[in-house]
Amino acid sequence: MQVIGLTGSIGMGKSTTAAMFRDAGVPVHDADASVHALYRGAAVAPVEAAFPGVTEGGAIDRDRLRARVLGDAAALQTLEAIVHPLVAAARDAFLDEAKASGAPLAVLDIPLLYEVGAERHCDRVAVVTAPEAVQKARVLARPGMTEAMFSAILARQVPDAEKRRRADWIIDTSGGLDAARRVVERIVAEAKRLHP
């Protein structure tokens, strides 16, 4: 089974692109969704122990947690040391299930793929991109997002140009949904040819 890593900086259209892979019949593991589930389950106790007061109603309050770790490298490392192994276990279970189902390929949707070295779990990587002005407009349109928050998020991400340089495939989402979908369909066809 071929494993494709799907990544892209904030605001590039990665979630929409992941849905296109699903629509093409490819199993997709969403690392963000996995974290959301963990923040209502296995990660609650260890995260609350490390950052007292970040839970609400038995789940991690993401806003409270973000306020505690954003811009604090040591706090972020502590959080990642708790969460990353749990996400990795969920990813491995997903890949085992996809392989057992006979799927010819699977996608790992990982926002910080290069940042955490997750490309080592992938045969190839597709990077979702858009021009900087498009990215900024998309991100700043999000409720509660500020220029400072956007800058802090970008500071922890590998630059878009570097991601594109390292990618096997590039999906530019600035040309509309149909254009992006055609690229996804081409990637699926190529990946299946590489691993029939």
Image: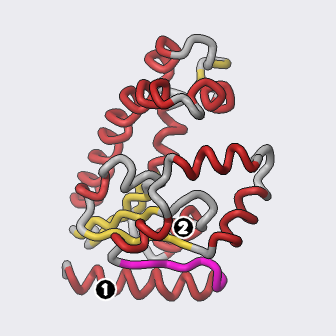
* Quarter the N terminus occupies: bottom left
Task: Specify the segment rendered in magenta.
Answer: 169-176
Please tell me in which quadrant of the rendered image residue 170 appears: bottom left
Indicate yes or no whether the magenta region holds residue 36: no
Q: Residue at x 62, y 31 (%)?
A: 66
Frontmost residue, 132 versus 10: 132
Q: Is residue 173 above or below residue 112?
A: below
Specify whether 155 is left or right of 193: right
Give the answer, above or below, for where 58 lies relative to 137: above
Q: Residues within 10 Å of mark 1 (few under 14, many from 20)?
A: few
* Residue 102 visible in rendering: no
Q: Position of residue 125 (x, y in %)?
A: 34, 69
In this picture, residue 109 sits left or right of residue 139: left
Residue 19 is marked as 2
Q: Residue at x 69, y 72 (%)?
A: 134
**176 shown above or below 92:** below
Instruction: Pinpoint residue 52: horizontal percent, then vertical percent.
Output: 57, 11
Q: Residues within 10 Å of mark 2 (few under 14, many from 20)?
A: some
As helix, strand or loop, the secondary structure at mark 2 comes to helix
N-terminal label among 1 and 2: 2
x 46%, y 80%: residue = 184
Residue 111 at x, y percent in the picture: 48, 54
Give the residue pinned by disc 1.
190
Q: Quadrant of the C terminus?
A: bottom left
Which quarter of the figure has residue 64?
A: top right
For the question of whether residue 185 can be seen, the reply is yes
Q: Amino acid at mark 2?
A: Ala
Q: Position of residue 81 (x, y in %)?
A: 36, 28
Residue 78 - label: none
Marks 1 and 2 in Cβ contact (< 8 Å):
no
Tell me how the rendering is colored. Answer: secondary structure
Q: Residue at x 42, y 73 (%)?
A: 164
